[in-house]
């Protein structure tokens, strides 16, 4: 009878392990967050704002005394940024911006942004708003990397 109880305990222990394994596996899965990455060329040449949605960016820059008069979207993509391997954003000046998720807390993602010849920054991205990061010079202007939650 004693062996029956022992084998029952072993069976429970094995079942318990079976329940824990999916939790451990999930903990090792890569965390990911969707980020809209937009590359904008801002310059003092002309007054073009293309597309019109960039008027908000122009107004924001004017409030902070950045004297750019022209804003032109170069590229825009939605990326899955994870915590295991950085995701690259190609810039028109021949370099790449690198994005990597550092963590998530209360719906806010902390993302490391690395751009050659620029300081590496850890930025916080919430469910709304945008983060602007200087991304280098290009054809007489400045490239700006705009990170935001994907538009629905």
Image (cartoon, grey):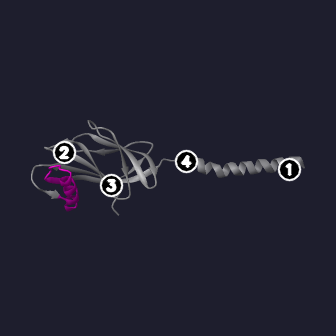
Label of residue 27 in the image: 4
- 60 in magenta: yes
Label of residue 48 in the image: none
Above-or-below relation of 85 to 68 = above
Label of residue 4 in the image: 1
Q: Position of residue 13 (x, y in %)?
A: 73, 48
Q: Residue furthest right?
A: 1
- N-terminal label among 2 and 4: 4
Image quadrant in which you'd find residue 92: top left
Disc 2: which residue:
142
24 relative to 78 in the view: left or right: right
Above-or-below relation of 112 to 70 = above
| Of residues 121 and 116, the one drawn nearer to the viewer in this rendering | 121
Label 2 close to label 4 by CB (< 8 Å): no
In the structure shown, which secondary structural element does the residue marked by tag 1 occupy?
Answer: helix
Disc 3: which residue:
148
Residue at mark 2 to residue at mark 4: CA–CA distance: 41 Å
Q: Which residues are magenta?
A: 50-71
- N-terminal label among 2 and 3: 2
44 relative to 121 in the view: left or right: left
């Amino acid at each position: 009878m004693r062996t029956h109880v022992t084998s029952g305990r072993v069976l429970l222990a094995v079942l318990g392990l079976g329940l824990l394994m999916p939790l451990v596996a999930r903990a090792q899965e890569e965390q990911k967050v969707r980020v809209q990455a937009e590359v904008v060329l801002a310059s003092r040449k002309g007054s073009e704002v293309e597309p019109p949605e960039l008027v908000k960016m122009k107004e924001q820059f004017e409030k902070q005394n950045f004297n750019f008069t022209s804003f032109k979207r170069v590229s825009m993509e939605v990326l899955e940024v994870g915590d295991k391997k950085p995701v690259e954003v190609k810039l028109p000046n021949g370099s790449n911006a690198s994005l990597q998720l550092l963590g998530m807390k209360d719906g806010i993602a902390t993302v490391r942004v690395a751009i050659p010849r620029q300081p590496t920054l850890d930025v916080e991205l919430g469910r709304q708003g945008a983060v602007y990061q200087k991304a280098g010079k290009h054809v007489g202007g400045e490239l700006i990397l705009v990170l935001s939650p994907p538009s629905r």
